[in-house]
Every structure is written in C-alpha cells, then in structure tokens.
Image: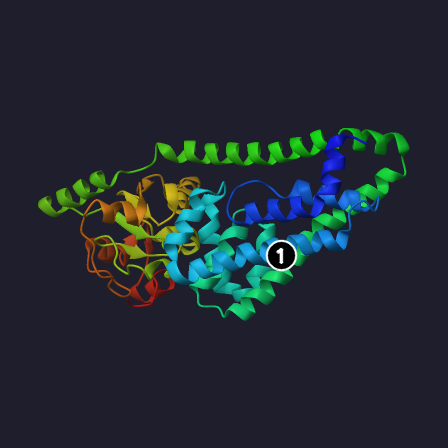
Amino acid sequence: MPIAIVFFVQYAYAILFLWVLVEQLGIPIPSIPILLTAGTLSATHRVSGTYALLAVLLACAISDSLWYALGRRYGGSVLRLLCRFSFEAQTCVSKTEGYFTRRGPVTLLFAKFVPGLSTVAAPIAGQTGMPYGRFLIYDIAGSILWAEAYLLAGRFFGDIAQRSAPFFHFLSRFAFFIVALMVLGFIVYRVLKQRKFLTQVRAMRLEPAELKQMLDTAAEHGNIPPFIVDLRHPLDYLPDPRVLPGALRIGPNELTQHSEVIPRDRDVILYCTCPSEETSAKVALQLHKMGVYRVRPLRGGFDGWKQAGYPLEDYVKDVPTSPAGVDLVKTVSGVVVTAPSLPVLVSSQKK
C-alpha cells in the first residue's frame, strides 16, 4: 500500500478535522476531495464513516461558532475581512444576506454547498442577532447534510471500485496524486474565475476623486449630476446609515429587474461595501448586457468614498431631494415612472 494512503488511514480523523477547520475558518482550500477520499476508504473499512462525520462536525461547530461570535460583536467589518480571503468574494456577502432575508436560519442548511456562502453564513447569523442555540442546531444540521453528501458519494465510488481488482489497485497506488490534482484543480478554477471577473471590471471602475469632480462640476454649472445607486444590503447600513450625495437605495435584484428606470443619457454610478466592488461590478456587467452602457462601479465603494473624506448625507426616505431623484419620477426612455412606484425600488427603512 502506498505510504501516502497508509499515512492518511492512520491519521484520517485528525486530517479531516484540521482540513475542514482551516477551510471553514476562511482559508480557501477545498475540503471536498478529502471528504471523497475518506468516503472511498470507508468502503474498505480502513476509515470509519461515523468517526469521519464526527470529526467534520466538530471542526464545523468550532469554526462556525467562532465566526458567529465575531459577527455578533463586529458585524460588517468581519464580513469584509472574510471576503478578502474568499475566491467567491463577488457573491459571498450579497447572496448570503439575501438568503437570510428571505429564508432566515434555513439558509444554514444549504450554505455549505454554495461556494462563498459557507464561511460568511455564520458571521451574518451573528450579525442578525439569531439566538446561538437556534444557530447551532441549524448549523450542525447543515454540516451533516454537507459532509454526508460527499462521504456517501465517496463510499459509493469505493464500492464500485472494489468490484474491479485492477482498477482498485490503480486507485490505491495513485490515490495521493489524484487527491492532490483534485485540490489543485479546485483552487486553479476559482483563481481563474476570480481573475476573469476582475479583468472584466477593471476598466469600468470610477475613482472617488473622479465622481467628486463630476458632482462639483454639475453643481457649479447647474447640470444634472450622475445617477448614483446605493446597492448596500440593509445590514450594511447599520455601521453608517448615510449615503453619497443624491444616492438612491436600490437592491441589486430590483435594479436589474427594473432597468427601465435607469437613465440612458447620463452616467450611472453604483457602489456597495464589498472588497474590489464585487456586487456593484457584477450588477454593472448585468446592466451592460441589458443595454445600459453608461454604468460604472465606484472604486472602493462606500468605504473608499468615506475614507477619502468626501461628503455623505442622511438618506431621504423614498424620494431623494437631488436632481437624480427628481429625474427618476419623470419619463425615462419613454417609460413614465410615478412616485408611488419608488418604494418598490427604494428601501423604505428610514435611518
């Protein structure tokens, strides 16, 4: 038996525990290949499927409880830190916040199956004030579903492999290299996906100084300023409920579903709180495909604007006082949008 397999069998539960713990703490090393390997070896009874599951659950409970506590205490700053280490940063926070808004703790049952959601689900649960007891029950249930799915898949593969002695011998001999290739493949795929995304949006970004100059120029000459959209989730408003001058609060889904309210005759600026402007960049790309071309994500988002010392203002419920808001209730590309329709698009939560 190859020495790599002997080593894995001897320390299988410790390897599973540490590997899953590190991944769930936010380091982007995929656990799926290790779970599949443990499941495959359980077919030969060299690894116990029950003990393997317990090792994974312990790792998930420790890491998720830690992130829950940090999210409860530090909120959005923890989420931004996590996303900087995630290959799925463009979706992790915005998707998970949306899932929690719609489904609550049920989100924890499937979060680990979705890349990017697994790690941020626990701190968001803490940030929303979910009771720890309820969190732990749903989190453990979700961890069982996730771990068992791959352990049983590996067990099924192992049972099939045992029916062919040559194939099982080949699998045992090169198991280490197969697992290494699987791990490397997961990492390379995520890196390439992230690099492709960043390449697409790099040329679109607008610097905070450029936006400030555009607003100053519009105010000085009496022109209509850029159409600014705040894409932050309501949870992101808690640390600072203010917005950029004249900005509208519109959720990413609402903005893409109601693109007819977006003016085509001036610049549309999107901002969020994600690292590298992931949410606003993704929405900008979607709007480009829908025919809205003068749309750009703000580099650094809300935090970048704030750190630059540029002005912020309290959000005016429903109808902003800036020309951007006034223009929105008029005819946009032939579509008349009246004031009563605005609460559908704009957050009605007054800060």
Residue at position x 19%, y 56% in the image: 322
Can residue 148 be seen here? The reply is no
Q: Is residue 113 left or right of residue 222?
A: right
Quarter assignment of residue 34: top right
Q: Is residue 66 above or below residue 300?
A: below
Q: How many marks?
A: 1
> Quick one: 219 or 65, which is closer to the camera?
65
**Residue indicated by mark 1:** 58
Q: Residue at x 81, y 42 (%)?
A: 158
Instruction: Check the image and name the residue furthest to the left.
Output: 220
The residue depicted at 22 percent of the width and 54 percent of the height is: 246
Q: Nearer the viewer, residue 131 or 257?
A: 131
Front residue of 220/24: it is 24
Q: Is residue 337 visible?
A: yes
Along the horizontal axis of the image, is 312 left or right of 195?
left
Helix, strand or loop under label 1: helix
Question: Which scheme is used to colour this image of the protein?
Answer: rainbow
Q: Give residue 265's position: percent from left, percent from top.
A: 27, 43
Q: Name the quadrant of the C terminus.
A: bottom left
Name the residue rendered at 31%, 46% in the picture. Answer: 301
Give percent across and percent down for residue 323.
20, 54
Camera-side residue of 23 and 219 = 23
Q: Amino acid at mark 1?
A: Leu
Give left or right: position of 221 versus 6.
left
